[in-house]
Amino acid sequence: MIISAASGGATDLSFHLEGYSWQILNCFLTASYSLTLRRIMDIAEQATKSGTLNEFSMVLLNNLLSLPLGLLLIFVFGEVDYICKTPLLKMPTFWLVITVSGFLGLFISFTSIWFLHKTSATTYSLIGSLNKIPLSIAGIVLFNVPTSMPNSLSILFGLLAGILFAKAKMSGSKL
């Protein structure tokens, strides 16, 4: 997967520092978040009488962990006034969409927590990074990005590496 990422970057036809900077920050924050969440889940499990947490408790812990950052960003960027004054709050369609979005977020949170509980934080991060491959393909197709054969092969190589990793993990091999 590392070879795929390096060859993909080397064969990229254009380079935008801002885009790569955001991607590096995204990778760093995603890895930090999953490692922190895994550690907090382990600490919380030890603090309970039974020594385990059910999925609901883990989802609650996950959302509580992200709440301070979300609130901080709302206040730092001055979103409080916008939220209070927006006419969207009076539209039933807005409330329908926001409710569906909330349930989908809850579902994603449950599945992420379940997966993190069943595997290691490293596996969780690695598998999570595999979503970048279909995202790369979608970006190339939707935004009509010119690509080269080496660039396309690096994406295919990353996909195959992800499949190989998943197969090795399912068979019990240590990677």
Image (spheres, rainbow, N blue to C red):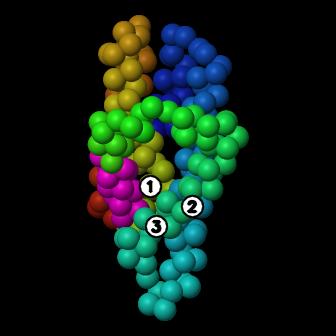
Question: Which residue sits at x=36%, y=9%?
Answer: 144
Query: Based on the displayed image, in which of its 4 quarters is residue 57 positioned?
Result: bottom left
Marks 3/2: CA distance? 9 Å
Magenta stretch in the rendered image = 100-115
Residue type at the position of mark 3: Leu
Q: Can residue 64 be found in the magenta stretch?
A: no
The secondary element bearing badge 2 is classed as helix
Residue 65's tag is 2
Query: Based on the displayed image, in which of its 4 quarters is residue 149 positioned?
Result: top left
Question: Which residue sits at x=44%, y=55%?
Answer: 124
Label 1 or label 2, whichever comes before in sequence order:
2
Front tag of 1 and 2: 2
Residue ID for mark 1:
124
Residue ID for mark 3:
60
Residue 37 against residue 133 in the figure, above or below: below
Task: Compare residues 38 and 72 and report the one nearer the observer.
Answer: 72
Q: Can residue 111 be found in the magenta stretch?
A: yes
Marks 1/2: CA distance? 18 Å
